[in-house]
Image (spheres, grey):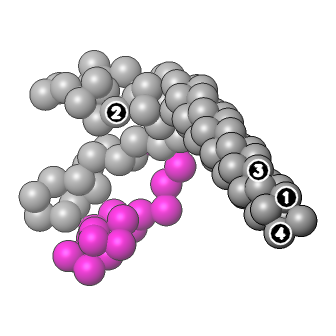
Amino acid sequence: MKKRIQNRFVADYILMFLISTLIGVFAVTLLSFASDVISKNLVNHNYTAAKIMTDDLSVMDVEPVLANGGGVQVVTKNYEVIFSQGINNLPAMLNPETFTDF
Protein backbone atom coordinates (compact mmCIF):
# COMPACT_ATOMS: atom_id res chain seq x y z
CA MET A 1 0.00 0.00 0.00
CA LYS A 2 2.79 2.43 0.94
CA LYS A 3 4.67 1.62 -2.28
CA ARG A 4 1.54 2.33 -4.35
CA ILE A 5 1.03 5.74 -2.74
CA GLN A 6 4.69 6.58 -3.24
CA ASN A 7 4.50 5.62 -6.94
CA ARG A 8 1.37 7.73 -7.33
CA PHE A 9 3.07 10.77 -5.76
CA VAL A 10 6.09 10.37 -8.03
CA ALA A 11 3.86 10.05 -11.10
CA ASP A 12 1.86 13.13 -10.08
CA TYR A 13 5.06 15.10 -9.43
CA ILE A 14 6.47 14.20 -12.85
CA LEU A 15 3.15 15.01 -14.54
CA MET A 16 2.91 18.42 -12.85
CA PHE A 17 6.54 19.17 -13.73
CA LEU A 18 5.88 18.38 -17.39
CA ILE A 19 2.67 20.42 -17.46
CA SER A 20 4.42 23.40 -15.79
CA THR A 21 7.32 23.15 -18.22
CA LEU A 22 4.98 23.07 -21.22
CA ILE A 23 3.05 26.07 -19.92
CA GLY A 24 6.31 27.98 -19.38
CA VAL A 25 7.62 27.16 -22.86
CA PHE A 26 4.28 28.14 -24.41
CA ALA A 27 4.23 31.44 -22.49
CA VAL A 28 7.79 32.34 -23.50
CA THR A 29 7.08 31.44 -27.13
CA LEU A 30 3.88 33.48 -27.18
CA LEU A 31 5.56 36.50 -25.57
CA SER A 32 8.50 36.29 -27.96
CA PHE A 33 6.17 36.18 -30.96
CA ALA A 34 4.07 39.09 -29.66
CA SER A 35 7.20 41.14 -28.95
CA ASP A 36 8.49 40.55 -32.47
CA VAL A 37 5.17 41.53 -34.06
CA ILE A 38 4.82 44.66 -31.93
CA SER A 39 8.40 45.83 -32.49
CA LYS A 40 7.99 45.58 -36.26
CA ASN A 41 4.75 47.58 -36.17
CA LEU A 42 5.89 50.44 -33.94
CA VAL A 43 6.24 53.66 -35.88
CA ASN A 44 8.97 55.22 -33.73
CA HIS A 45 11.49 52.65 -34.94
CA ASN A 46 10.73 53.48 -38.59
CA TYR A 47 11.55 57.18 -38.40
CA THR A 48 14.77 57.65 -36.44
CA ALA A 49 16.71 60.92 -36.30
CA ALA A 50 19.49 59.40 -38.41
CA LYS A 51 17.02 58.73 -41.25
CA ILE A 52 15.41 62.18 -41.15
CA MET A 53 18.26 64.57 -40.34
CA THR A 54 20.08 66.41 -43.12
CA ASP A 55 22.58 69.28 -43.12
CA ASP A 56 20.06 71.55 -44.85
CA LEU A 57 16.87 71.92 -42.82
CA SER A 58 14.89 73.19 -45.83
CA VAL A 59 15.12 69.79 -47.55
CA MET A 60 14.47 67.68 -44.47
CA ASP A 61 11.48 65.40 -45.14
CA VAL A 62 9.34 65.32 -42.00
CA GLU A 63 6.04 64.42 -43.68
CA PRO A 64 6.08 60.72 -42.66
CA VAL A 65 6.58 61.71 -39.02
CA LEU A 66 3.82 64.32 -39.15
CA ALA A 67 1.47 61.91 -40.94
CA ASN A 68 1.86 59.48 -38.02
CA GLY A 69 1.09 62.12 -35.39
CA GLY A 70 4.67 62.89 -34.40
CA GLY A 71 6.84 65.94 -34.27
CA VAL A 72 10.35 67.04 -35.18
CA GLN A 73 12.41 69.59 -33.30
CA VAL A 74 15.99 70.60 -34.08
CA VAL A 75 17.97 72.06 -31.18
CA THR A 76 21.38 73.76 -31.48
CA LYS A 77 24.33 73.38 -29.12
CA ASN A 78 23.15 76.56 -27.37
CA TYR A 79 19.77 74.92 -26.65
CA GLU A 80 17.94 77.10 -29.16
CA VAL A 81 15.06 75.50 -31.06
CA ILE A 82 15.71 76.38 -34.72
CA PHE A 83 13.20 74.04 -36.36
CA SER A 84 9.93 72.68 -35.02
CA GLN A 85 7.00 70.99 -36.73
CA GLY A 86 4.25 68.75 -35.44
CA ILE A 87 3.96 68.08 -31.74
CA ASN A 88 5.59 71.08 -30.10
CA ASN A 89 5.75 71.55 -26.36
CA LEU A 90 9.17 73.21 -26.29
CA PRO A 91 9.91 76.88 -25.64
CA ALA A 92 11.99 78.79 -28.21
CA MET A 93 14.99 78.75 -25.89
CA LEU A 94 15.95 75.85 -23.65
CA ASN A 95 18.30 75.51 -20.73
CA PRO A 96 20.22 72.35 -19.80
CA GLU A 97 17.52 71.28 -17.33
CA THR A 98 14.60 71.56 -19.77
CA PHE A 99 16.69 69.95 -22.51
CA THR A 100 17.42 66.99 -20.25
CA ASP A 101 13.70 66.67 -19.51
CA PHE A 102 13.03 66.84 -23.25
Q: Where's the N terminus, which quadrant?
A: bottom right
* Residue linked to disc 3: 11
| CB within 8 Å, label 1 to label 4 | yes
Name the amino acid type tagged 1. Answer: Arg
Residue interval drawn in magenta: 85-102
**Secondary element at tag 3:** helix
Q: Nearer the viewer, mark 2 or mark 1?
A: 1
Against 81, is 83 above or below?
above
What residue is rendered at 23% in x and 30% in y? 50
Q: How crowded is mark 2: few (under 14 residues within 10 Å), some or many (20 or more)?
A: few
Which residue is denoted by mark 4 in the rendering?
2
For residue 4, the mark is: 1
**29 left or right, relative to 90:** right
Q: Where is residue 84 in the image (x, y as percent from the top left)?
A: 39, 46
Asked whether 40 or 90 is in front, the reply is 40
Residue type, numbered disc 3: Ala
Residue at the image point whose x is 43% and y is 32% from the top: 45
Q: Where is residue 66 in the image (x, y as percent from the top left)?
A: 54, 32
Q: What element carries label 4?
A: helix
